[in-house]
Image (spheres, rainbow, N blue to C red):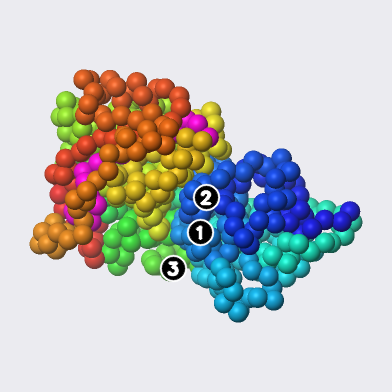
Amino acid sequence: MKLSGAKLLINLLERQGIEIICGIPGGSNLIIYDALRDSSIKHILARHEQGAGFMAQGMARTTGKAAVCMGTSGPGVTNLLTAIADARLDSIPVVAITGQVSSSLIGTDAFQEVDTYGLTIPITKHNFLVQSAADLLEIIPEAFRLAESGRPGPVVVDIPKDVQKEIVEITSWPEHGLKDAVHTCDDNDLKQALEMINSSRRPIIYAGGGVVAADCSDDLLKLAHKNSIPVVSTLMGLGAYPDGDSNYLGMLGMHGARSTNMIMEEADLIIALGVRFDDRAVGKACEFCKHADILHIDIDRSEIGKIKSSNLSVVGDVGHALSELAANVESSIRISWSARIASLRMKYPEIIPDSNETFHPANLIRIMGESLPDDAIITTDVGQHQMWVAQKYPFRKPRTLLTSGGLGTMGFGLPNAIGAAFAKPDKKVVCVSGDGSFLMNIQELATLAEQHLNVKVLIMNNHRLGLVRQQQELFFEERFFASSFESNPDFASIAKGFGIPAFDLDDQDNPELFLRKILGQDGPCVINIPIGLENKVFPMVPPECANREMIGD
């Protein structure tokens, strides 16, 4: 069978099980698009390549499977870079397929030429510059294997135009690119880990995104219950352990609960599972839980000792580790530790606003939590609204929070919600955004309207870059600059212009009832919600401070 490189690529993607691709055509990938026209794969025409990259992320984050985005050369590639870097920092399996100028023109500053290979080396798990069509038989399965194996991450496949046109003879098809077998942990290491846990008096489990990636939330719950170990979560780990469980202490770190950070100060063992000790979680690293031993389990050897030294490190799949630990740990009831935790939670209680203040961010998120099912998918942009969601929304299942953790990308929320709705059409999807973030990828409202997806967008609107202004107020002596929007658009009218139902919540006679009603309906909708400038994200760990040095309520 003779196929062009472009048709070979599409065939390989079909065989890989890809059903949806998000992207934008251009001069250097039109040959691929021409081949895609006759494919069973559904193409989603994004309005910006960054949107396409984040849509692919939304699919990958909700399923754990590699998703595909496409862009042309030059600006198509550079527009994809932010989404690729975001996927790298949050360990999300994405395969980005980019068009490139013909091989003979590479390095000549040809029209729409950039060094895709060089640009993406630092922000990918691996990248390929395809030199012949036949190489695709090996490269495409390998790209998916790499993206999903071990610590997941993005892979870029850059295909010059002449390679797309090249005709090759296909005699047999390669095996599908499947993720590698689980990297099991060393038995002796796990035995030592069990000894550390069983002999500790005040242990705490510190769970991160690695627990979500390994799909091992059930074993985490078993371990915590069997040995009576309290659990804290990173931002990326929210949902890995159910909110409301008696052992759950919430999110730690910069905007974690004060009681959570103070409880961690009294631990004698930190069981770090699938975490990287990032600065937003641990604050000043040398001060983080300095009186506790640390047991660190992670799939990525490079994270061991990178920021925080551990007393015992176990390199391997955290799912395998949790399965073994949950099965073999001693049953224990830690009465004194539980009592001390209860005492500290009473000493540092959560500040709850008056329930009649509907437009207080905490109450808006409470209404969301009460109105949506446990398996609803929540996406956020980046800023105050993101932290309010992390603090207040009751995440009870993994892969129900999609947020930009490592890169902190404004404009993330809407296209991620679109991707999530493609991957999970039976789920309710809600994007919580801020007026500043929403403007970053507002053009994807056209994609949402075109596809008529079940996505609700809630815009917390204070006419400010809220978290920037908060830091200017607290740490720059109220020298406010470049953080206020003197001219802010009418978001409801704009959404209606795209063909999406939209409302201003403050125009409703009963805002709470109206919000509950909208969240219960199907189909797309945008709701603009004015919030007061006085609302701050508290408590907060100031820069360069230890987690115990929190300020605010």
The mark that comes first in sequence, 3 or 2, is: 2
Q: Nearer the viewer, mark 3 or mark 2?
A: 2
Helix, strand, or loop for circle 3? loop
Pointers 2 and 1 in contact (CB under 8 A)?
yes
**Percent position of residue 66, x then y:** 60, 50
Question: Which residue is most to the left?
Answer: 477
The residue closer to the viewer here, 410 or 314, is: 410
Is 334 inside the magenta-drawn segment? no
Label 2 crowd bin: few (<14), some (14–19), many (20+), radius 10 Å: many
Where, by quadrant of the figure, is residue 512 drawn? top left
Residue indicated by mark 2: 52
Q: Tell me which numbered mark, 1 or 3, is placed earlier along the sequence.
A: 1
Q: Residue at x 58, y 64 (%)?
A: 73
Q: Quadrant of residue 469?
A: bottom left
Q: Is residue 497 left or right of residue 427?
A: left
At mark 2, the secondary structure is helix
Residue range (magenta): 451-470
What label does residue 342 carry, if any?
none
State if disc 3 and disc 1 touch (CB < 8 Å): no
Mark 1: which secondary structure? helix
Say what amino acid the circle numbered 1 marks.
Leu
Whole-angstrom CA distance, mark 2 to mark 1, is: 8 Å
Q: Is residue 406 visible?
A: yes
Identify the mark nearer the N-term, 2 or 1.
2
| Front-most of residues 159 and 494 | 494
The numbered mark at residue 80 is 1
Amino acid type at mark 3:
Gly
Q: Residues within 10 Å of mark 3 (few under 14, many from 20)?
A: some
Residue closest to the eye, 285 or 186:
285
Q: CA distance from mark 1 to mark 3?
A: 32 Å
Judging by the rendered image, the residue that carries numbered circle 3 is: 305
